[in-house]
């Protein structure tokens, strides 16, 4: 793509850009400027569209609900006929059922027995829930003061009004959104095509599951956490395995990945002291920067383009992989998917203990959030915080985010926590 800015041009737009001590916020801004959005659109049946990115505004072509209707089982009547300080008797003109229009008349002094969802006949504006009423022979007695005019009536178009945008393009479709699309009578939703993401692990010490584990080697775990994190994002995956520290093998892997995917994620081989060939091959094949980010864990990272694909060269340490993924890659992939990216909500929780923290870098400590004795949220840091200790991530239910400018935290002080689990 010819009209893309170069990495140097992007860097010049990011104020305070310093590749050797890059604050997290600047790295995020750089990446947001770097990544393109997929353009292709496909139409999907509603049931297949969960988690996909809406490609166009959905404008309501009808009022939902189409008619004023009852929100309760009870009696529909004219609110003006209710006495303010005494009970009011009504004769019953008939019954209105949901889905079947009552087409008789409801004269003055009459009410209509009505079911939830049944259309309100013209002139009736109020529904008294049946549990408030008393029957006296053929008549319904409504006590004073149990409803006001307009109560328990749903107005036509109050959910979705004709001509109004029901959902905006860029929305990540959630269950309620799909229900709304259905309530408009639409069977299909236009969504952006799924992002394709290729990934592989680099490092001569890595072994794949099923292979023997010689002295000094470790099983490749990053590919499994990356696979899982990408699966949660709903992208298409291309797992290219473990790639040996060999220039030809690395070149082939990068070429294959860039040719078939929108984004390429690697882990390992990007730190300063690296003896291996990963950085050289990245540099040779693409326009790539090597950052030292002011964060912990996850200092080294490569970012750039190889062909038309965006490269995220994550560090090798398993916790650093996950933290850099959530700090940078997640939002970038969502943006590439065409989603309107919102910052993730954070909890404020009281730290159960003091935490040492140097200003001038962002730290992501693994924590367990629970209810404290006073009913508020508290967070306890999980054991050892080494960037190779994946257990710290597994035990945690949130990331404690200690911001760039923040210093030591006292016991009991509130900190920001990114919870791992969401509701929908
Ligand atoms: P590197 O960034 O390549 O220097 O790797 C840093 C540390 O992470 C080293 O201890 C590596 O053995 C480890 N590591 C790198 N890649 C992986 C992986 N895919 N799975 C598990 N550990 C890894
Ligand atoms: Mg390595």
Image (tube, grey):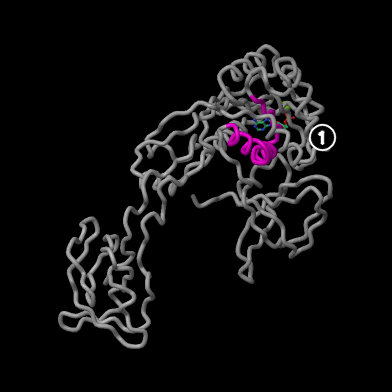
* Quarter of the rendered image showing ligand 1: top right
Specify start and end residues of the magenta stretch as a single range: 310-336
Quadrant in which residue 319 is drawn: top right
Residue 333 colored in magenta in the image: yes
Assign a secondary structure to mark 1: loop
Q: Position of residue 392 (x, y in %)?
A: 66, 47
Residue beneath disc 1? 17
- Quick check: 305 left or right of 360? left
Q: How many marks?
A: 1
Quadrant in which residue 50 is drawn: top left
On the question of residue 342 being in view, the answer is yes
Q: Position of residue 416 (x, y in %)?
A: 69, 55
On the question of residue 214 being in view, the answer is no
Q: Residue at x 74, y 65 (%)?
A: 412
Name the one closer to the observer, 310 or 68.
68
Q: Is residue 309 above or below residue 347?
A: above
Q: Residue at x 72, y 57 (%)?
A: 415
Q: Main secondary structure of the magenta part?
A: helix
Quadrant in which the N terminus appears: top right
Q: Position of residue 321 (x, y in %)?
A: 67, 36
Mark 1 neighbour density, 10 Å: few (under 14) some (14–19) many (20 or more): some
Q: Is residue 73 above or below residue 157?
A: below
Name the one closer to the observer, 268 or 95.
95
- Quick check: 88 left or right of 9? left
Residue 255 colored in magenta in the image: no
């Amino acid at each position: 793509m010819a009209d893309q800015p170069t990495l140097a041009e992007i860097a010049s737009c990011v104020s305070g850009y310093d590749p050797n001590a890059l604050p997290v916020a600047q790295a995020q801004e750089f990446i947001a400027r770097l990544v393109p959005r997929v353009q292709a659109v496909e139409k999907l049946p509603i049931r297949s569209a969960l988690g996909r990115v809406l490609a166009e505004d959905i404008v309501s072509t009808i009022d939902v609900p189409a008619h004023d209707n009852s929100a309760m089982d009870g009696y529909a009547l004219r609110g003006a006929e209710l006495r303010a300080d005494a009970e009011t008797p009504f004769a019953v003109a008939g019954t209105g059922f949901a889905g079947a229009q009552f087409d008789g008349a409801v004269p003055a002094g009459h009410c209509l027995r009505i079911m939830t969802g049944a259309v309100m006949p013209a002139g009736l504006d109020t529904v008294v829930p049946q549990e408030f009423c008393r029957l006296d022979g053929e008549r319904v007695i409504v006590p004073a003061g149990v409803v006001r005019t307009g109560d328990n009536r749903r107005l036509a178009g109050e959910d979705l009004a004709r001509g109004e945008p029901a959902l905006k393009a860029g929305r990540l479709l959630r269950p309620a959104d799909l229900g709304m699309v259905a309530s408009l009578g639409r069977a299909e939703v236009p969504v952006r095509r799924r992002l394709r993401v290729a990934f592989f692990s680099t490092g001569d010490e890595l072994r794949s599951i099923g292979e023997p584990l010689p002295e000094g080697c470790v099983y490749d775990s990053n590919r499994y956490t990356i696979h899982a994190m990408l699966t949660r994002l709903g992208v298409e995956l291309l797992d290219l395995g473990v790639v040996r520290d060999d220039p030809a093998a690395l070149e082939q892997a990068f070429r294959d990945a860039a040719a078939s995917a929108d984004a390429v994620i690697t882990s390992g081989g990007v730190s300063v002291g690296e003896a291996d060939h990963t950085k050289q091959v990245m540099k040779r094949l693409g326009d790539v920067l090597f950052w030292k980010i002011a964060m912990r864990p996850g200092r080294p990272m490569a970012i750039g383009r190889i062909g038309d694909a965006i490269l995220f060269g994550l560090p090798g340490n398993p916790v650093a992989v996950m933290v850099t993924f959530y700090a940078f890659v997640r939002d970038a992939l969502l943006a590439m998917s065409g989603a309107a990216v919102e910052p993730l909500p954070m909890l404020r929780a009281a730290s159960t203990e003091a935490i040492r923290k140097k200003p001038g870098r962002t730290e992501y400590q693994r924590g367990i959030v629970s209810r404290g004795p006073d009913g508020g949220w508290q967070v306890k840091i999980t054991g050892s915080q080494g960037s190779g200790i994946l257990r710290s991530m597994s035990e945690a239910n949130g990331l404690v985010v200690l911001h760039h400018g923040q210093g030591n935290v006292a016991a009991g002080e509130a900190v920001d926590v990114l919870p791992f689990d969401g509701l929908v």
